[in-house]
Image (cartoon, grey):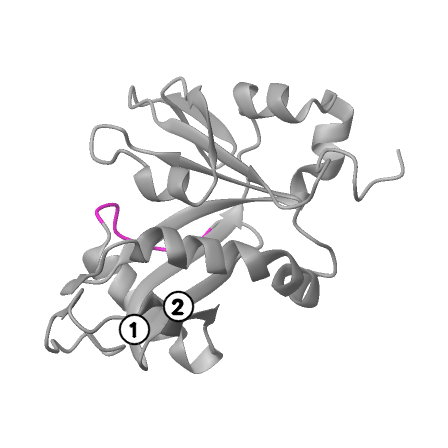
Amino acid sequence: MDRNGAEQDNINNQGANLKDLIVRPITSGEENDWNTLMAKHHYLGFHCLSGRNLKYVALLNGQWVALIGWGAAALKCSPRDRWINWSDEQKYARLQYITNNQRFLILPGVSIKNLASKALALNVKRLSADWETVYGHPIVMVETFVDHSRFKAICYRAAGWVPLGMTTGYGRTGGIYYYHGQSKTILVKSLFKNAATCCFSG
């Protein structure tokens, strides 16, 4: 599938070389195509990414094969907060240094072994530097919440993400928490050694 949503020949394992995979931020001229494809093909649909965000595309031999979107971290996530060991005061001051993988989509017609984990790894490798270029500060940790009724999160685990347990089935809209009953698997990954303290003086 190309960036305009037009069907192409299926991209599969035959002849595919992940050494040629490129993951980069989208350009301003690509954003409408990214949004349209995500809205059409992601099971949650798409309206926007929350808070400060970055959108990426993975390309193989010039063709779009995956889309990745990062946005604001969850305000509250007890397993994550225990894992990173920040006080409440530190968490609210430092939450901007965490970003949430809010959308990840392998485009229709693409079936390549290990593509998802490779794309994630390449994206995370450059994410903090890209974030600092755009927003003026690094990212020290990434998080995501995976619907375990649909996915096993294998690509995240293969890319070195750590499972921390399950969410409690609450969501947040407009600053108000509500119970929707769908727990999700929490996964995180540090981008720096000693991520809890490496970029902070206090």
Q: With respect to residue 149, does 27 lie above or below?
A: below
User: Is residue 48 part of the magenta span, yes or no?
Assistant: yes
Give the main secondary structure of the magenta stretch: loop
Which part of the image, by quadrant, shows the C terminus?
top right
* Image point (74%, 61%), residue name: 136
**Amino acid, disc 2:** Val
Q: Position of residue 110 (x, y in %)?
A: 18, 64
Tell me: 93 left or right of 68: right
Against 79, is 111 above or below? Answer: below
**Comes first in the chain, label 1 or label 2:** 2
> Is 155 above or below relative to 116?
above
Q: Which residues are magenta?
A: 43-49
**Would residue 61 be found to the left or right of residue 138 on screen?**
left
Which quadrant of the view contains residue 21? Answer: bottom left
Q: Is residue 197 magenta?
A: no
Residue 11 seen in the current view: yes
Q: Are marks 1 and 2 in contact (CB under 8 Å)?
A: yes
Can you say whether 130 is above or below 181 in the image?
below
| Front-lying residue, 83 or 45 | 83
**Residue 48 at least partly seen:** no
Q: Percent position (x, y) of residue 50?
A: 49, 49
User: Which residue position holds label 1?
Assistant: 64
Q: CA distance from mark 1 to mark 2?
A: 7 Å
Q: Which residue is mark 2?
A: 57
Tally of numbered discs: 2
User: In the visual, does 146 lie left or right of 40?
Assistant: right
Q: From the top left corner, tell me how far across and down residue 125 is, in percent.
A: 56, 57
Mark 1: amino acid:
Trp
The residue that appears at 51% across and 35% down in the rendered structure is: 188
